[in-house]
């Protein structure tokens, strides 16, 4: 494929990755920012979202759109509840101590993975998209008659992938509104800034933490429900998203939600675009080193505040 | 404060120690005391099954287990091996080479099995094989990897039930070059398994006058593939694909979405859709494409009774899906390897008069002496020829075309098409 | 500190215990113990950086793998004699630790965690990239015939156990000595409060760099020993899970204790072994145990013992 269309294709695919990554990373960023804990099981909440989506869509027959919409509502809700329960019974007990949280969430990771293996099974199972049409995309080139559109071979996107991008944007905007314009958002931001003072003002910090933890998990699950018609639900699918989400949150800057979005777009798009220029393995190595170097020279991330 | 001194002599100490150990032994918690006496004529023959119960190999592990249980049941219904029943001991290796080696130690030293068997993923095989040789434990793998025949492993490791990737790939080249096209774009996973495909097929198609014009290596654990497809050159005759892992369905779907209505010929290895229903949404474009099949998933019109019996025993229907759930498609192209390997173990034990672990070397020599294995209930995938020197078996390969949603065999490559020069002679190595 | 102080007696006792166990245990468990001792070397290396210096690295698998590949490639491709290959393995790990450390130590806390993780990821990808020599994820075998030292075949049970024990003992005693030196105590000071250590005039940067090099070296010993005694080198050992394992081992056994890493490896190994004989869902059991342990015994086994019963525990 010629360079121009290839780049466009890689960019579109990268945008889909970035969209899902933004949701997942946002969930982690909120938890990290407000509660200051490293949740190693975050990827498993993502996985649970996909698996629950499969259960819901299998249970609801008929047109795939019905099951999908139901899954979009039910799966994040359920995962949020599970996460809030984990916070109440486990994380509170260990008082959010950093090391202990890491071990506890690793334990949760094993529990969720094995539990899913025992119920859902080892296979990767597909979920049908509510709609999916192949859209051939045009490209403009300078032909004999001036600028013309033509349809390069292979340059296409599916309608569902475009939907994913749009949906992620909508959700992020809704989240932004929630955090900046509502009382709950205000409480969350207050707790993030200074939890002791917030408590002095009568904010039930414990309950806020559970809410935030649940919200973070629900966002990851939502990202997974959106992506599962493109990929499949598999009990090991949480590993990569966990890694990527962490990188995004750190690069974007701890405690900075806009930073997370920017970093997600950067990282989601770069993987695809770099692979246009280099062989995939080299592209991955370059991308990884690039991220590392950013962190070394700017440890607070792109938008984070320097801690003196 | 008075300190009482107990009168502890060595005798009382040893007695107490012995009593303690005895009590523990009676509860069965001490290892080794639970074992039954060896070489009793009715004591079962124990086969240690190294199963990928968790990890990336778990979908295969599940079907490997189903086939193993069915094969052992058949053997036991038939009177067992040398009049003794067969017992399968399962351990999960987590599809991890470190755990795989630990599991072999468990088989040998704790479960006291006679042989170990059943591994699929190459890195687990290679990680475990050294231990098998050190433990002097016969290790029958069902892996498709070329590692056995390459000479990397040892005299205790054998692969008598499934063909290896070099032979499979080599047998495909004539059909591809003569029927589909000479300019091939290859898409494969960027690790050892994929590299084997790249290297072996590259040689084989060149021998047919063809050429690999693009080699697209996909990094491991990749979940979205569309961005790689633009590297397929416009003048490709045939796209050759083989993909493994949980993302195979995404891979095939996106391949179809990329090409849309105008696609070149496509030749894939059934690995790309193992355990995936060919009627899944998004796979309609596979109509008219070709697949290598290790064992035809859909029962053919002229199906042998051996295949029919095999399906009934394992519990799959005519489309290779579970009888209990027609959406639950099996790993049909690989799992026959377990069935056939167990039958080879049985034949080897009977020929060598195997009684116990002292006879392991005789067992291996008996298997090394095997050559032709006819198409039968013991070998339902097809006739086989075993090469005792390289410890690798050779068999038929099938090429199917997707026709009206069914995989219809169009060409059967014979054993001879897949033969290649010996790269090792394990029989010259000492035990 | 006298020769017969309680910590010294404990260390000697542990080593003597390991010697005695070889004769007492059935072959299955003595085989396991060889493996546990080698992995404990890895854990002890990790403990230097995490337990004593307080730096959480998520990339130690790269040091373990460096030791493993340094040794394996030297023997297989270079035809180098065994002891030299072993040293090459350790040296590779040390060199990698120096390079990575000098870059990664510009960050702290969570950023350090991610940077080490990213370096480890890069190392893994590089191993795969040079698959022509490394055989990538499939890995390669170091043949039995190559694993002999001074005429002794290292693949027999006895030789394996003795080698593992000797290597373990050297690292164990050396590190136990190290943490008593002023250098070791400075590391602890850095862990407790780096600002204060710096204000008191200690060059924390150099200390941290030395700590990571020592940590990487010891991890490399573990990797080279693993390849030498078990005959397999593969990229699986460079994946993230092999960076998480030493963290788990050290946290479970007791971070910042000398015996903790060994106990941690031992505990995890037998937890998995025991629960897999009881149920196929053994990871579930492990997960539950981890959660319970961190809720009720957060300092790890030895850490809790030190806190509650034996305050002199080193």
Image (cartoon, coloured by chain):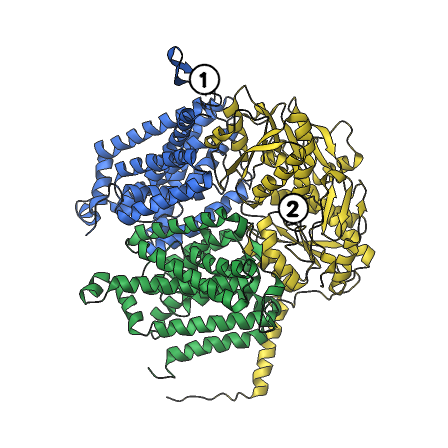
Chain colours: A blue, B yellow, C green
Quadrant of the rendered image containing residue A227: top left
Front residue of this view, candidates B88 and B425: B425
Kindly indicate whether the residues beneath marks 1 and 2 are on one polypeptide chain.
Answer: no
Callout 2: residue from which chain?
B
Q: Nearer the viewer, residue A75 or B144?
A: B144
Can residue C299 be seen in the rendering of this structure?
no
Residue lying at 38% horizontally and 73% vertically, measured from the top left: C176
Distance between mark 1 and mark 2 Cα atoms: 49 Å
- Please tell me how crowded label 1 is: few (under 14), some (14-19), or many (20+) other residues with Cα within 10 Å: few
Q: Which residue is mark 1?
A: A151
Residue B1 sits above or below residue A71 on the image: below
Residue B74 drawn above or below residue A67: below
Q: Is residue B56 left or right of residue A238?
A: right
Mark linked to residue B65: 2
Horizontal and vertical percent for residue A253?
27, 43
Query: Residue at the spot x=78%, y=37% of the render?
Result: B306
- Of residue C153 and residue B56, the one placed in the foreground of this image is C153
Q: Residues within 10 Å of mark 2 (few under 14, many from 20)?
A: many
Give x and y (percent) for residue B280: 57, 27
Q: Dot 1: what SS?
A: loop
Q: Describe residue C57's horizontal placement relative to residue B328 as left or right.
A: left
- Which of the two discs, 1 and 2, sits closer to the camera? 1
Q: Residue A91: image x %, image y %?
A: 34, 51
Which mark, by number, is residue A205?
Answer: none
Question: Answer yes or no: do the residues labelled 1 and 2 have beta carbons within 8 Å?
Answer: no
Which structural element holds mark 2? helix
Q: Position of residue A146 (x, y in %)?
A: 36, 12
- The chain carrying label 1 is A
Residue B249 in view here: yes
Q: Residue at x 74, y 32 (%)?
A: B412
């Amino acid at each position: 494929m010629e360079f121009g269309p290839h780049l466009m294709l890689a960019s579109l695919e990268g945008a889909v990755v970035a969209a899902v990554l933004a949701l997942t990373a946002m969930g982690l960023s909120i938890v990290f920012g407000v509660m200051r804990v490293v949740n190693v099981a975050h990827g498993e909440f993502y996985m649970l979202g996909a698996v629950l989506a499969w259960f819901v869509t299998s249970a609801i027959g008929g047109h795939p759109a019905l099951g999908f919409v139901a899954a979009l509502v039910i799966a994040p809700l359920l995962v949020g509840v599970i996460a809030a329960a984990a916070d109440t019974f486990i994380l509170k007990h260990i008082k959010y101590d950093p090391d202990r949280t890491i071990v506890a969430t690793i334990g949760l990771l094993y529990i969720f993975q094995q539990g899913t293996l025992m119920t859902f099974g080892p296979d990767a199972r597909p979920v049908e998209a509510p709609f999916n049409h192949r859209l051939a995309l045009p490209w403009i080139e300078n032909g004999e008659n001036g600028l013309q559109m033509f349809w390069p071979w292979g340059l296409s996107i599916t309608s569902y992938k475009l939907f994913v991008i749009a949906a992620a944007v909508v959700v992020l905007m809704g989240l932004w509104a929630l955090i900046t314009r509502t009382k709950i958002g205000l409480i969350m931001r207050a707790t993030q800034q200074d939890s002791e003072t917030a408590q002095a003002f009568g904010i039930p910090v414990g309950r806020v933490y559970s809410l935030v933890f649940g919200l973070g998990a629900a966002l990851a699950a939502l990202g997974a429900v959106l992506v599962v018609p493109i990929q499949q639900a598999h009990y090991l699918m949480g590993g990569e998203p966990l890694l990527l989400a962490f990188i995004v949150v750190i690069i974007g800057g701890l405690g900075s939600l806009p930073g997370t979005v920017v970093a997600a777009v950067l990282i989601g798009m770069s993987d695809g675009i770099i692979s246009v220029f280099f062989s995939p393995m080299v592209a991955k190595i370059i991308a990884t080193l690039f991220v590392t170097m950013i962190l070394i020279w700017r440890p607070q991330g792109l938008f984070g505040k320097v801690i003196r | 404060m008075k300190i009482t001194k107990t009168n502890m002599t060595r005798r009382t100490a040893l007695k107490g120690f012995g009593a303690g150990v005895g009590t523990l032994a009676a509860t069965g918690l001490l290892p080794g005391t639970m074992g039954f006496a060896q070489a009793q004529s009715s004591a079962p023959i124990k086969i240690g099954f190294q199963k990928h119960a968790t990890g990336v190999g778990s979908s295969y592990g599940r079907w490997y287990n189903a086939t193993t249980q069915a094969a052992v049941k058949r053997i036991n219904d038939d009177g067992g091996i040398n009049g003794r029943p067969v017992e399968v001991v399962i351990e999960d290796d987590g599809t991890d080479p470190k755990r795989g080696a630990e599991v072999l130690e468990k088989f040998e030293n704790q479960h006291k099995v006679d042989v170990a068997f059943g591994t699929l993923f190459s890195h687990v095989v290679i990680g475990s094989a050294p231990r098998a040789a050190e433990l002097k434990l016969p290790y029958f793998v069902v892996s498709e990897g070329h590692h056995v025949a390459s000479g990397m492993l040892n005299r205790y490791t054998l692969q008598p039930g499934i063909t290896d990737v070099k032979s499979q790939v080599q047998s495909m080249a004539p059909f591809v070059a003569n029927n589909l096209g000479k300019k091939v774009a290859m898409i494969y996973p960027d690790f050892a398994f994929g590299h084997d495909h790249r290297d072996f097929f590259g040689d084989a198609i060149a021998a047919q006058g063809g050429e690999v014009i693009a080699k697209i290596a996909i990094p491991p654990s990749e979940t979205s593939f569309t961005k790689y497809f633009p590297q397929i050159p416009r003048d490709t005759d045939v796209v050759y694909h083989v993909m493994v892992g949980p993302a195979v369905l995404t891979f095939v779907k996106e391949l179809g979405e990329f090409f849309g209505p105008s696609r070149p010929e496509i030749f894939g290895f059934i690995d790309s859709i193992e355990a995936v229903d060919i009627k899944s949404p998004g796979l309609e474009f596979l109509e008219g494409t070709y697949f290598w099949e290790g064992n035809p998933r859909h029962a053919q019109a002229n199906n042998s009774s051996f295949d029919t019996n095999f399906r009934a025993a394992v519990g799959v229907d005519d489309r290779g899906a579970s009888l209990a759930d027609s959406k639950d498609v099996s790993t049909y192209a690989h799992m026959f390897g377990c069935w056939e390997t167990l039958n080879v173990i049985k034949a080897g034990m009977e020929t060598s008069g195997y009684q116990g672990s002292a006879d392991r070397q005789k067992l291996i020599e008996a298997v090394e002496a095997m050559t032709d294995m006819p198409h039968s209930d013991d070998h339902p995938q097809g006739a086989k020829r075993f090469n005792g020197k390289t410890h690798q078996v050779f068999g038929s390969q099938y090429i199917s075309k997707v026709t009206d949603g069914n995989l219809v065999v169009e060409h059967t490559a014979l054993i001879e098409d897949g033969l290649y020069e010996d790269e090792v002679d394990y029989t010259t190595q000492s035990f | 500190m006298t020769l017969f102080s309680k910590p010294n007696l404990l260390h000697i006792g542990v080593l003597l215990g390991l010697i005695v166990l070889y004769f007492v245990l059935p072959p299955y468990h003595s085989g396991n113990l060889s493996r546990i001792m080698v992995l404990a070397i890895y854990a002890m290396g990790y403990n230097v950086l995490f337990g004593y210096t307080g730096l959480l690295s998520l990339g130690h698998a790269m040091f373990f793998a460096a030791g493993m590949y340094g040794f394996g490639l030297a023997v297989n491709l270079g035809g180098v004699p065994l002891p030299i290959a072993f040293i090459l393995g350790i040296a590779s790990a040390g060199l990698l630790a120096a390079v990575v450390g000098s870059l990664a130590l510009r960050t702290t806390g969570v950023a350090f965690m991610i940077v080490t993780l990213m370096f480890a990821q890069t190392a893994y990808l590089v191993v795969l990239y040079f698959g022509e020599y490394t055989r990538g994820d499939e890995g390669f075998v170091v043949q039995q015939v190559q694993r002999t030292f001074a005429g002794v075949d290292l693949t027999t049970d006895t030789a394996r156990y003795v080698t593992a024990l000797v290597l373990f003992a050297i690292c164990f005693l050396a590190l136990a000595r190290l943490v008593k030196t002023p250098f070791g105590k400075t590391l602890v000071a850095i862990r407790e409060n780096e600002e204060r250590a710096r204000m008191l005039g200690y060059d924390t940067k150099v200390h941290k760099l030395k700590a990571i090099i020592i940590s990487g070296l010891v991890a490399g010993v573990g990797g080279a020993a693993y390849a030498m005694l078990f005959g397999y080198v593969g990229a699986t050992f460079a994946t993230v899970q092999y960076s998480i394992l030493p963290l788990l081992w050290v946290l479970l056994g007791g971070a910042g204790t000398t015996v903790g890493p060994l106990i941690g490896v031992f505990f995890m190994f037998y937890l998995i072994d025991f629960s897999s004989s009881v149920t196929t869902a053994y990871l579930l059991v492990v997960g539950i145990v981890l959660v319970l342990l961190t809720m009720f015994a957060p300092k790890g086994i030895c850490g809790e013992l030190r806190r509650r019963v034996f305050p002199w525990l080193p």
